[in-house]
Amino acid sequence: MTTAAAHVAVLGAGAWGTTFAKVLADAGREVRLWSREEAVAASINEQHRNEQFLPGIDLPAAVTGTSDPAAALSGADIVVVAIPSQVARTALAPLAPLVEPHALVVSLMKGVELSTDRLMSEVVGEALGVPDDRIVVVSGPNLAKEIAVEQPTATVVASTNEDAARTVAAACGNAYFRPYTNDDVVGIELCGAVKNVIALAVGIAQGMGYGWNTAATLINRGLVEMTRLGVAVGARAETFAGLAGMGDLVATCASPLSRNHTVGSHLGKGLTLEQAIAATGGTAEGVKSSQSVLELATKHGVEMPITAGVVAVVTGQIPVAELGPMLLSRPQKAEGV
């Protein structure tokens, strides 16, 4: 594998998948973007746009669309997966025979699989039959709409295989997108999963009319929760202070472009979960991942009160008005505990 793999397949033409295809093309790669919707693939080829999921953005000529997974995957040195996390296993398993035997597989997904508590790298590996040393994860403060208009950002490219991480970093690094490599795959993935849950909590609070003191409290204590869980499952504590941890947590909790924050805000204003998701108009991974994150924490004996509160709200166990009292009535203790 060279450090400048030329042919890349991106599976999933949602906002983030399409944006990452643009990032790769702007870094000099030829990209085949797979969409289940033939109309989306046709629009990418004919208008160089994906108006359904990334409106108003012109895509480079090096990005071509296809609704045929075999055409997308043929000859691809790197396969990027940008599919909603809770359907990833089902969607990927039939594609396993189509992946080139040398290809690196990159997960852009953020979540923990329901019922199995598997991280997305594990789901990818099991579904596609790919070993750990060919799996890479990408996570950071990467709001798709900002990157699509080439606002500068950084990200973390993580793998247990340093050469694999460097290859993917070289493939996606460009003038506005700076990748850093890391080998703490578990830590990077948990950052991406848990920050969505905390963003829901912050959105709920702000939807209810609470200000930045409340938001800052939830963000900070949310960082404590994700670090506590990460260390319990073998991640390094310092990972959670980095781009994929604190960096992405701030972006996801504070930006109106964050779908998780937006869904939470709608909940805080009194909408039902179904209404909140419909009003947001996109997948909010934290809604389902909150339950699997809590399951993982319970399995490892880790206390995560904010996550537990979000789960109680999205599953209808408590109304949103009870979330604040639920958290504030907890026993007092030292901050570092």
Image (tube, rainbow, N blue to C red):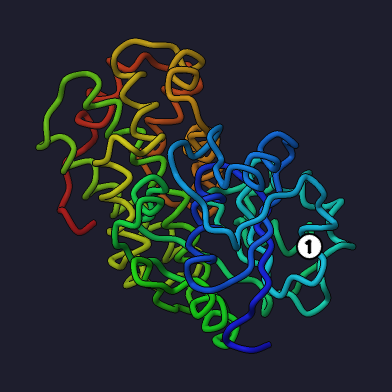
Residue 117 placed where, x, y %?
A: 62, 49
Q: Is residue 255 left or right of residue 68?
A: left
Residue 150 percent across, percent down from the top left: 34, 57
Amino acid type for the residue under numbered disc 1: Leu
Quarter of the view holding residue 327 = top left
Give whichever of 312, 261 is nearer the camera: 261
Residue 301 relative to residue 155: left or right? right
- Which residue is farthest front? 46
Locate residue 317, reporting x and y percent: 46, 17
Going 75% across and 49% down the picture, which residue do you hit? 66
Query: Which residue is pictured at 81% across the width and 52% down the height?
Result: 69
Residue 315 sits above or below residue 131 on the image: above
Q: Could you tell whether 180 is left or right of 2 in the image?
A: left
Q: Of all residues shown, which one is farthest toward the right? A: 97
Residue drawn at the location 27% of the way across and 40% of the way down: 255
Which residue was labeled with disc 1? 73
**Left or right, residue 332 beside residue 99:** left
Is residue 135 or residue 235 the one in the foreground? Answer: 135
Residue sitting at 45 percent across and 65 percent down?
A: 188
Above or below residue 269? Residue 135 is below
